Amino acid sequence: MALSRALILVALIASIFSTMAVAEDFIVGDHNGWTTWFDYKTWTANKVFRVGDTLTFKYSAWKDNVIRVNGSDFISCSVPKTAQVWNSGHDTILLTSPGRRWYISGAANHCKSGQKLFINVLPPQGTWWSPTPSPFASRSPSPSSKPIEIVLTPAPAPSSKPVEVVLTPAPAPAPWTPTGWKPKNLFKLFQ
């Protein structure tokens, strides 16, 4: 009986780990690479970018580069003086946080010829280990913890200025206390 419960627990843990996504390396533009007259909007249409993934830009180093800009610079193809610039010809960028990213070429007229990339980076998949209260956490809520409310509204009509959304982290959950919890109670979940 105990052996069958242990096997069920092992199977449950194995299924959780098997569903976790592995980070992907996206070669920007696939076999076309980072170039002019390529539709990067169509290229991103069927892709999901997540924290932990990487973007690899491949191009001729002596005649091009990659510059990270904000939304308004993306639209106007402007290169700010303080922008981050890559110019190796084989640049790999790790996506470390969720949110919008805009990249353009700083070479003359390349951005205006379509060499610009916009992506939206999502949180990592399988974030079951994220800092959320566990079922074994203290039963009394912390006075500073408040539920997070997400409101979905229809998208506004396109405007000439991009809108940037800033997300703030939720307050830390109450610390976990093992009071009254014993490992054998875990098996009651499978009865």
Image (cartoon, grey):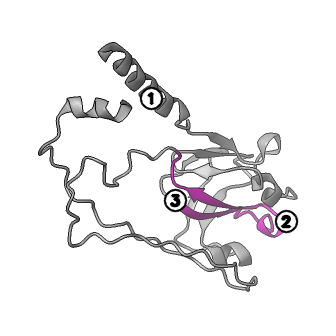
Disc 2 marks which amino acid? Ser
Q: What element carries label 3?
A: loop
Identify the mark at residue 98; answer none if there is no mark: 3
Q: Residue furthest right?
A: 37
Q: How far apart are the two marked residues, 1 and 2, measured between alpha carbons?
A: 51 Å
Mark 2 is surrounded, within 10 Å at the Cα level, by few (under 14), some (14 to 19) or many (20 or more) other residues, namely some
Give the quadrant of the C terminus.
Answer: top left
Is residue 46 found inside the magenta-colored segment of the image? no
Q: Mark 1 points at which residue?
A: 12
- The image position of residue 151, as x and y in percent, is 55, 75
Disc 3 marks which amino acid? Pro
Q: Closer to the camera: disc 3 or disc 2?
A: 3
Give the quadrant of the N terminus.
Answer: top left
- The image position of residue 166, as x and y in percent, is 48, 74
The reply, left or right, for residue 36 in relation to residue 78 is right
Q: Closer to the camera: disc 1 or disc 2?
A: 1
The reply, left or right, for residue 74 in relation to residue 175 is right
Q: What stretch is highlighted in magenta?
A: 99-125
Mark 1 / mark 2, whichever is N-terminal? 1
Q: Residue furthest front?
A: 191
Q: Closer to the camera: disc 1 or disc 3?
A: 1
Q: Name the residue under label 2.
A: 113
